[in-house]
Image (spheres, helix red, strand yellow):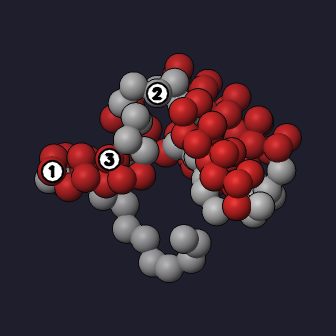
């Protein structure tokens, strides 16, 4: 969600169980994905195709970082999504998962 007050919290200050729960809900393959999740993309595509509207997303945590911090673009388009995947893959190659979460 956008807006609202936000507080930066260090990973070391978060209980491991809470961190695991949040990552499991938001991006279950986060620690093994290359910054994007082809399984989630196919699932979301099929969900959206069968419903006739956008009902499911497929952005990983790393893709959300790419979109919000690097691209600063929330436009819904296939071109933007592809750019987001490319940037997320580069982020994942450059930084370790703990740094990305921080």
- The quarter of the picture where residue 48 lies is bottom right
**Does residue 6 appear anywhere in the picture?**
yes
Instruction: Classify 10 Å Cα crowding around label 3: few (below 14), some (14-19), many (20 and above).
Output: few
Residue at (25% x, 52% y) in the render = 21
Asked if disc 1 and disc 3 are in contact, CB closer than 8 Å, the reply is no
Look at mark 3 in the image and give the residue it sits on.
Answer: 24
Mark 3: secondary structure: helix
Query: How far, Cα to Cα, is label 2 from label 3?
Result: 13 Å
- Could you tell whether 5 is left or right of 65 in the image? left
At horizontal 74% and vertical 51% (from top left) the residue drawn is 49
Distance of label 1 from label 3 (alpha carbons) = 10 Å
State the SS at label 2. loop
Percent position (x, y) of residue 55? 64, 62
Residue 50: x percent and y percent?
70, 54
Q: Residue 76 placed where, x, y %?
A: 79, 56
Read off the residue under disc 1. 17
Which residue is at the front of the view, 56 or 79? 56
Q: Earlier in the sequence, mark 2 or mark 3?
A: 3
């Amino acid at each position: 969600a956008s807006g609202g007050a936000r507080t930066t919290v260090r990973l070391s200050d978060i209980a491991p169980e809470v961190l695991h729960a949040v990552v499991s809900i938001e991006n279950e393959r986060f620690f093994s994905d290359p910054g994007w999740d082809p399984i989630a993309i196919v699932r979301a595509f099929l969900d959206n195709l069968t419903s006739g509207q956008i009902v499911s997303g497929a952005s990983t945590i790393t893709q959300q970082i790419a979109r919000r911090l690097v691209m600063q673009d929330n436009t819904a388009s296939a071109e933007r999504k592809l750019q987001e995947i490319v940037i997320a893959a580069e982020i994942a190659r450059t930084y370790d998962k703990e740094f990305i979460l921080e």
